[in-house]
């Protein structure tokens, strides 16, 4: 222990130094602990909502998507799907064909995106787990069916799945005429087999049916709009992209989930940094309490400073004593705040004690995901703030030529 550390510890913890300054220092410790704990909790809550949003996107956006570079469709036989499935990082894959259509039920109509899927679609996306009514079933023998989102079903006025059928209108490729618009559409009436529940945007946008029916509706005979790939747990999507690109020719592009929705993931990153910097601003304001405690302590210890000077202490040593004192006050508050923040986050993550007061949400309690990287980020940010505040305070009060205050 250095001499400056020894003096700093005795000023704060000495049993003979009980005074109003120690009380102010204790208040400063609490004032620092609260925003530190809040930063950990806020970042953990944000991580929880971010994970929830990503899981919702994962229901319709695959880990990897293979699509044509030119045009919207490609020959389903143009890609060696067996070779792609044989890659060690690939868990499952599926071919899809999707296009915008008009859905009709009774007198209600909505514009939707119909995705035709094959029998392997359930291995890539956990759609069945999201079905709240009926079953996930896009084909029963030779009978094609459709699965709707709850928001889409509400817009169409679907109240029961018993013998419920909807009309699907798709534009015929290359045969649309403004003079005879009805002849430019392919129409099919399809029974509804189930309803799924996700976020409001997805529920109101996507409907699922069989790949065979989608190809018939859209005029995509033997063609698809994309090959969707699910990777094994722990596989790095960016690292797998070159391997899939080598199996596909130059006519195809391979995109990760982040590349398919760059704006969404960019906004998620910006929001997290925004939450962090707002919390950091609160921490800086709370650190002003350390300034007050440290200033009063330096004024109270003027006689000690004169004694140290008489014993040969220079200005740099005196400054180090009070800088360490400020770091000690802030560090004690940071430790308490970190324990509270990490503890509360882990308890909420494990038990979900704080409930969301809304029955329309997908979760019953606030989602929380604690990440050690957030802890390191908060510690680094606080260390920078505490050192800067302590140093500026001490250097502003102890001048080079006036070390006696």
Image (cartoon, grey):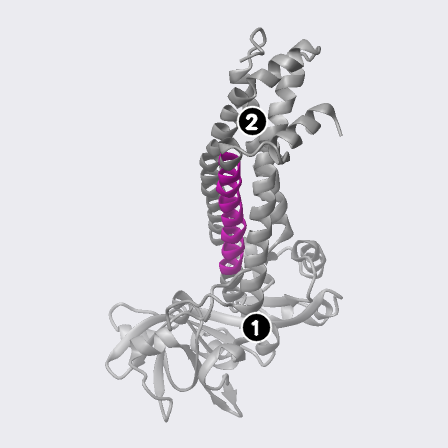
Q: Position of residue 50 (x, y in %)?
A: 51, 57
The one nearer the camera, 78 or 247, is 247
Kindly report which numbered mark, 2 or 1, lies closer to the viewer in this rendering. Answer: 2
Check disc 2: other Cα within 10 Å, few if <14, some if 14-19, many if 20+. Answer: many
Residues shaded magenta: 24-50
Mark sitting on residue 38: none
> Residue 83 appears in which quarter of the rendering?
bottom right
Residue 287 in view (yes/no): no
Residue 388 in view (yes/no): yes
> Residue 232 appears in which quarter of the rendering?
bottom right
Q: Position of residue 307 (x, y in %)?
A: 64, 14
Above or below 318: residue 359: below
Above or below 258: residue 174: below
Q: Is residue 112 magenta?
A: no
Q: Secondary structure at mark 1?
A: loop
> Residue 154 appears in which quarter of the rendering?
bottom left
Residue at the extreme top: 401
Q: Secondary structure at mark 2?
A: helix
Q: Position of residue 223 (x, y in %)?
A: 54, 72
Above or below 271: residue 233: below
The one nearer the camera, 23 or 34, is 23
Q: Is residue 27 magenta?
A: yes
The one nearer the camera, 25 or 69, is 25
Residue position marked by numbered label 1 in the rendering: 125
């Amino acid at each position: 222990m250095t001499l400056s550390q020894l003096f700093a510890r005795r000023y704060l913890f000495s049993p003979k130094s009980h005074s109003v300054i120690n009380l102010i220092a204790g208040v400063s410790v609490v004032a620092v602990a609260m925003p530190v704990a809040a930063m950990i909790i806020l970042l953990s809550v944000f991580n929880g909502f971010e994970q929830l949003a990503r899981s919702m996107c994962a229901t319709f956006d695959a880990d990897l998507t293979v699509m044509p570079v030119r045009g919207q469709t490609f020959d389903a036989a143009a890609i060696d799907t067996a070779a792609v499935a044989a890659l060690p990082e690939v868990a499952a894959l599926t071919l899809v064909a999707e296009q915008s259509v008009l859905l009709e039920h009774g007198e209600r109509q909505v514009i939707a995106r119909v995705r035709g899927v094959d029998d392997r679609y359930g291995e890539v996306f956990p759609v069945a787990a999201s079905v709240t009514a009926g079953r996930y079933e896009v084909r029963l023998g030779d009978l094609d069916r459709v699965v709707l989102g709850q928001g889409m079903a509400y817009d169409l006025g679907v109240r029961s799945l018993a013998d419920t059928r909807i009309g699907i209108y798709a534009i015929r490729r290359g045969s649309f005429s403004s003079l005879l618009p009805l002849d430019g559409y392919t129409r099919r009436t399809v029974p509804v087999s189930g309803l799924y529940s996700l976020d409001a945007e997805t529920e109101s946008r996507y409907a699922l049916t069989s790949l065979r029916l989608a190809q018939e509706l859209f005029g995509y005979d033997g063609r698809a709009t994309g090959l969707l790939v699910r990777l094994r747990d722990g596989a790095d999507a960016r690292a797998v992209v070159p391997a899939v690109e080598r199996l596909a020719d130059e006519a195809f592009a391979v995109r990760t989930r982040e590349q398919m929705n760059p704006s969404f993931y960019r906004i998620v990153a910006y929001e997290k940094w925004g939450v962090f910097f707002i919390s950091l601003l609160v921490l800086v304001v709370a650190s002003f309490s350390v300034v007050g405690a440290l200033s009063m302590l330096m004024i109270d210890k003027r006689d000690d400073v004169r004694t140290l000077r008489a014993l040969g202490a220079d200005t740099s040593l005196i400054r180090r004593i009070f800088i360490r004192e400020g770091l000690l006050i802030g560090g004690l508050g940071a430790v308490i705040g970190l324990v509270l923040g990490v503890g509360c986050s882990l308890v909420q993550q494990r038990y979900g004690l704080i409930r969301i007061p809304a029955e329309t949400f997908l979760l019953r309690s606030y989602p929380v995901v604690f990440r050690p990287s957030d802890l390191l980020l908060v510690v680094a940010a606080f260390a920078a703030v505490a050192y800067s505040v302590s140093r500026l305070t001490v250097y502003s009060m102890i001048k080079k030529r006036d070390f006696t205050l």
